[in-house]
Amino acid sequence: MRNIELFIFARVLHVIGVVLWIGGVAFVTTVLIPALRNLTDTKQRYELFEKLERRFAMQAKVVTIITGLSGFYMTWFLNAWNRFTEPAFWWMHLMLLVWLIFTLVLFVLEPAFLHRWFNQQATKDSENAFKWLQRLHIALLSLSLIAIVGAVAGTRGFSFF
Ligand code: HEM
């Protein structure tokens, strides 16, 4: 495979990764959590969340790795490291930031204490725990969508300033 073909392949993988990953985050944010918050049985609410979101977390881990590897490969191929020093390429910073947050949550914080901590919070005050869970997901989804808008427009030469 020629180098340019490898680059195109990495880009395809990157976008497929983003679709599966951020699409899943959108589903959890706009469909799953609101539906769970409508359940009155708080035990059932937590158990369902546990089953469904944990299953998505597995998929998210795989696509986070694929998106990160393809992203770093493209940066290397384009020799675009200097973009990280230029404010005009804020969307490169944002892509990296979104990736770092999810990587930290999925691979470090979640197994270390987040899982146990959320379980405790949901047992103590389920309404409040799920309200904050939804807020956090909305914030992360918004950040991800801004990164996507910036990247798609930015890679085609659009200048935001
Ligand atoms: C390690 C983290 C990441 C790195 C190093 C990275 C790097 C890159 C690079 C180098 C490009 C191609 C730029 C160009 O052709 O000039 C790109 C495109 C793109 N990235 Fe990322 N990225 C990362 C994470 C993400 C994340 C988390 C998202 C989604 C929130 C994302 C969404 C996109 C999109 C939508 C494109 C444009 C694809 C297209 O329209 O062709 N990236 N990324």
Image (spheres, helix red, strand yellow):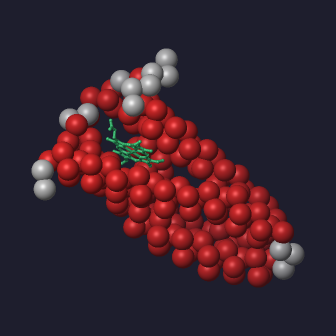
Q: Is residue 53 visible?
A: yes
* Residue 124 on image: x %, y %: 78, 71
User: Who's the residue at 34% across and 31% down the image?
Assistant: 84
Whether residue 87 is visible = no
Residue at the right extreme? 40
The foreground one among 102 and 71 is 71
User: Percent x, y for residue 49?
Assistant: 67, 74
Asked whether 21 or 103 is in front, the reply is 21
Check the image and report above or below for 160 versus 153. above
Q: Residue at the spot x=48%, y=51% of the render? A: 101
The total number of labels drawn is 0
Q: Position of residue 51 (x, y in %)?
A: 62, 80
Indicate the quadrant containing the N terminus: top left, top right, bottom left or bottom right.
Answer: bottom left
Task: Specify the quadrant of the image occupied by residue 38.
Answer: bottom right
153 lies above or below 125: above
- Residue farthest top in this picture: 161
